[in-house]
Structure formats: structure tokens, C-alpha cells
Amino acid sequence: MVSRPNSAARLDAVFGNPAAAVVLAVLCNILWGSAFPFIKMGYRLFAIDGTDTPSILCFAGVRFMIGSALVWAFGSALRRRPLPMPRGRVLAECCGLGLWQTAAQYFFYYTAVATLTGAFGGILNSTQSFMGVILAHFLYGQADRLNARKALGCALGFGGVLVATLGNHGSGSAQGIFCMLAASAIFAAAGPWNKAVTQKADSFSVCCLNLGVGGLALALAGFAMGGRLTPQSGAGVPVLLYLAFISGAGYVLWALLMKNNPVSRISVFGLLIPVVNTLLSALLNGEPLFEWQYLAALVLVCGGIFLVNRPRRAAAA
């Protein structure tokens, strides 16, 4: 009889395959790039005003709890048995990660979405890639130090953000800008923690708890503050379910990719997020596309992401 751990080993082998990793990283970042415009669409379909923080938290919390359930169902079906849950200290770490990476990050993220255009918000959110590079320098030292190429990439990326803010052309408030940058900083800080936890527990279980605990915290806070979640048309529920799918599929894909690949192999594909975000924001929400600030910022941000994630060439023999 084939032992149960072999299924996890086969999954790791697929995600560790370089060609498969590229395809899955592209898919993951396309999904994440579509999140911002679909959240803004969801606000319209649920009649959530940008100042209605309680309902915004309800919308975010329910999305992540559904996403958690989807992760649990898929992981259990894949293993043909209920998803194993960690215990003790590892369980506490997973719950803490959920409160930090999901609840705290998306409190700021969803607040920012309500006040920023998709293109501008996506460009601001891309700073998480550069913050992660800077943080890695201090966490890992020589193993992932900030060299001249990475420093230039970070400079280009942050330069792109500055270009996008020229004349406040992103039609976003100072509060929205602060919240998106705060969300990016939390995401960057959570990366090493997430990677460490997935080495101690099943990736699906970590994702399930991350989304479930964080989503529950957001939902409880929102409903306790008087928030409501009432769809105004038949399209509201499908949009919410799609966002739940993004959260579940995106977190699982990324966790498995991070577990089985060098970070530099997959992180470069994060340049797709602001591009997909901008295109879909124009298509779905009627936002401006061919504005020189956005186009220039996208070029700088994507160039910066490419530089910081480009693998170092092996020294000649």
C-alpha cells in the first residue's frame, strides 16, 4: 500500500519542477493582480461606501473565511482524509500568522482599496517586493544581502511609486496611500514568518488557519461595529466567491512555491500584479489606462522587480 506522505512528496515534486514553478507563479500573480479591481467591483455590488469601515471588514472577513473553507476542502480531497491540523506551539504560530498576515494586512489593504484607483493602488502595493528585499538583507545577512543590483532595483521601484503620485494623479487620499503602504510593509514582514511556519506544518493547514483565523477576526470586528453584507444584485455573490477562490488558491500556490523553490525563481513574476491590476481596473471599473504617470510608473516598478529578483550569474570556472 502506498503511504500517505507520498502524496505530499509528489506535490512538492511538481511545485519544485522549474517549468511547472514558472507556470504556477504566473497563474498565482495573475489571480492576485485581479483582486484589487474585483474588490472595488464588490464594494459597488454590495453598496459599501468607502467610509463604511464595519461593512468593509465584514466583506473582507467573509471572503477569507470562505477561502479558508475552500483550502480545507481541496487539501482534504487531495489527501483523501481530513486536513491535519498542527498542535501546540505550531498551532499558536499559525493563528498568530493569521492575525498578522490576514487580519492586520487586509484591514489596511481593504481600507486603501476604498479610496484609491486600481492602477495607483496596485503600483503602491508593489512596494512589498522592495520592502521584502530590504528586510531580507537584515534578516539573512550574507545569504541574501542587498547588493548594487538590488539597490538599483529598489530605487527604480520606489521611483515608480513617486512618479505615480505626481499631482496626486492617482486620485487617492493620503489615508489610502498610508494604508496601502502599511499593508505592503506587513506583507513583507510576514514573508519570512510564513516560510518558517510552512517548514513545520502542512502548507494547506497553514493557509487554512491563516485565512480562517484572520478572516474570523475581521468579520467579528466588522459585525460587532454594525457592519452589513447585503448584495444589491445577483452578481454580488459570484464576485465574493471569486475573491474567496483567489485568496485560497493564491495562498496555497504561493506557499508551495516558496517552500519548494529559491525565492528568486518565482518572486520576479510579481511584476505581473500591477500590470494585471491596471488592465483589469480599466476594463472592469472604467478607470483611466493610458495616463503617462501610470505607464511610466509601471515601467519603473516592473524594471525594479526584475532587477531585485534576477538570479546572480554563476562565476566562470
Image: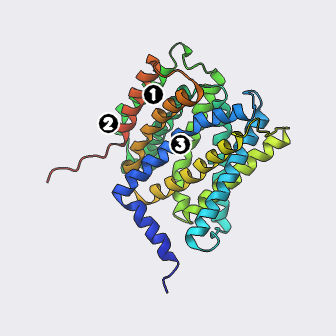
- What crowding class fits label 2: few (fewer than 14 Cα within 10 Å), some (14-19), or many (20 or more)? some
Residue 215, compared with residue 147, is above or below; it is below
Residue under label 2, please give it: 149
Instruction: Identify the element where label 1 is drawn.
Output: helix
Rendering quarter of residue 269? top left
Please say if 117 is above or below 91: above
Amino acid type for the residue under numbered disc 3: Trp
Q: Residue 5's x, y, as percent?
A: 50, 76
- Tag 1 or tag 2, which sits nearer the N-term? 2
Q: Residue 294, image x and y in percent?
A: 47, 22
- The residue at 42%/23% (across/down) is 295
Please state which amino acid type lies under the numbered disc 2: Arg
- Kindly identify the amino acid type of the residue bearing the numbered disc 1: Phe
Residue ID at (32%, 43%): 310
Vertical arrangement, residue 217 with respect to residue 281, above or below: below
* Drawn side of residue 41 relative to residue 154, left or right: right
Circle on res. 11 = none
The residue closer to the viewer here, 175 or 30, is: 30
Q: Residues within 10 Å of mark 1 (few under 14, many from 20)?
A: many
Asked whether disc 2 touches disc 1, contact meaning CB atoms under 8 Å apart, the reply is no
Which residue bears the numbered disc 3? 32
| Residue assigned mark 1 | 158
Specify which label sits upstream in the sequence, 3 or 1. 3
Tell me the quadrant of the picture where the C terminus can be found.
Answer: bottom left
Among numbered discs 2 and 3, the one appearing first in the sequence = 3
Which colouring convention does the figure follow? rainbow
Point out the residue furthest to the bottom here: 1
Whether residue 96 is visible to the viewer of this picture, yes or no, is: no
The reply to whether the C-beta atoms of the residues labelled 2 and 3 are less than 8 Å apart is no
* Nearer the camera: disc 2 or disc 3: 3
